[in-house]
Image (cartoon, helix red, strand yellow):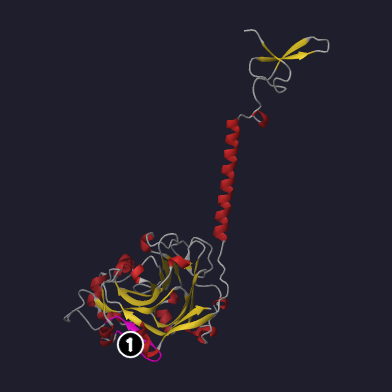
Amino acid sequence: MPPHFLKPGDVPPGYAPPGYDEIMLTRGGGASVRHVQTSMPWWNPRYWRKRVWFGVVAAILIVIAIIIGVAVSVTKKNAYPNYSTLSYSLVDTYSGEGFFDQFNYFTGYDPTHGFVHYVPQTQAESLNLTYASKNSAVLRVDTSVGPGDSPDASTGRFSVRVESKNTYDNGLFVFDIKHTPYGCGTWPALWLTDRSNWPDNGEIDVMEATNNATDGNQMTLHTTDQCSMNVRRKETGNALKKDCNHEKNSNAGCGVEADDDSYGTSFNSDGGGVMAMEWRDAGIRMWQWARSSIPSDIKNKTPDPSTWGTALADFPSTNCDIGSHFKNNSIVVNIDLCGDLVYALWDDSGCASNCTDWVANNPEAFTNAYWEFGAFHVYRSS
C-alpha cells in the first residue's frame, strides 16, 4: 500500500494515526517525509478519549465520596449533645403514708414469664407486702407460704408490681432508696415504661439486678430500632451492649453497669442512697450517691445536674432520637421471681436447685427481697 500523506496542521505535532507520515516542506519548495509517533502518550490528558475521561471523573468522585463518608463518620462519633443547664421545679412527690395511693397495682400475667403472682392492692396490704409510714414505703415478696401450706407456692410466689398513675415525657427524677431487694430467684427493678405501648414508647431501667446482685446495679434503655449508643459518651460506669433495639442481643438493651457497691448488701448496709435520672431531648443521664454523699441541692429540693459532675450512665441523643423513642412512661417498681433474665443467668448464679423449685419451696430465702424507699421527687424544666 502506498504511503498516506498528511499536510501540516492536519494532526497535532508529534502524532498521526498509525500508518501515516507527515510531509515537511523545505524552504526550497521540496518536501521531506517524517514518520510520526503512532501511539498516544497515556500521561497526557490532551489525548485521552471520552471513556478515559469518564473513568477518571468517576474515580475522583468515588474518592471524594469516601473522604466525605469518613469525615461524617468521624464527626458523628465525636459529636456530643448540648446538656445546657436547665432550671427544674418540683411537680410530683411520692412519699409518706399515701405513697402507694399514687400507684396502680398490676395483676396480669407477667410479660417476662416470671414464676410470680402479682397481687392487687387489698391483698398486698393484707399480706403486708406493701405498707408505708411517714418516712418509708416498703414493697416486698411474700415469705409466709411454704411447701406444706395450702395453697402453696407451686404455681408461683406472691409479689407486687406497681405503676404510677402519672405518666411522663421527660423530667428529672430523684429516688431515695433505703434498701434494695436481693436473693436467689429475684429480679427486682425500678424503671419507667408505657406497658401498653412497649417497646414503642421505650423503657428506662434505673435500678435492676438479679439473684444475689453481686455485680451491682445496671441501668439500661430498651427501644425500637434506630437507637444506638455507639457514640461519644461521658460516664463513669461500664458500658455493655450499645444497641438499644429490643430486637437485638435478645433484648439486652444498651446497658451500663455500676460497681459492686451500687446495689445489694453493701449498698443496703450503708443506708442506701439516691438515684437521679435526667430525661431530656439531649439525652438520658443517671447519677448515684451513697447516703453520706447526697448533694445539698438534692436535699434542699433545688437540684442542678450541671453541678453533679460526670454521670454514672450517659445515653446521649447523638444516634437516638430521645423524644420519639421515650414518652408516656409511668414509674414502675416490682420484684419479679425467676423470669426470662433469671433463667438465662441461673447456671452461673451460684444458686441451688432450679429457679422455680427454689422459689416455691424456700420462703425464708426471700427475707431480704424487699424495696424500701424514702421519697420520689419529680421535677420539670421551666
- Evaluate whether residue 3 shows in this view: yes
Q: Is residue 261 above or below residue 66?
A: below
- Horizontal and vertical percent position of residue 173: 46, 78
Q: Residue at x 63, y 17 (%)?
A: 18
Q: Determine whether, in the image, residue 321 is placed left or right of residue 11.
A: left
Q: In the displayed orientation, state which residue is furthest to the top.
A: 2
Q: In terms of image quadrants, where is residue 211?
A: bottom left
**56 and 297: which is toward the camera:** 56
- The N terminus lies in quadrant: top right
Q: Determine whether, in the image, residue 200 is placed left or right of residue 80.
A: left
Q: Residue at x 58, y 57 (%)?
A: 75
Q: Determine whether, in the image, residue 189 is placed left or right of residue 291.
A: left
**141 and 322: which is toward the camera:** 322
Q: Is residue 130 above or below residue 38?
A: below
Q: Determine whether, in the image, residue 297 is placed left or right of residue 164.
A: right
Q: Is residue 12 above or below residue 298?
A: above
**1 and 345: which is toward the camera:** 1
The residue segment tinted magenta is 129-142
Residue type at tag 1: Tyr
Q: In terms of image quadrants, where is residue 74?
A: bottom right
- Horizontal and vertical percent position of residue 316: 51, 66
User: Around disc 1, counting alpha carbons within 10 Å, would you say few (fewer than 14), some (14 to 19), or many (20 or more)?
Assistant: some
Identify residue for label 1: 131
SS at badge 1? strand
> Residue 330 in magenta?
no
Q: How many marks?
A: 1
- Evaluate whether residue 369 shows in this view: no
Q: In the displayed orientation, state which residue is furthest to the bottom.
A: 134
- Horizontal and vertical percent position of residue 262: 44, 76
- Horizontal and vertical percent position of residue 8: 74, 18
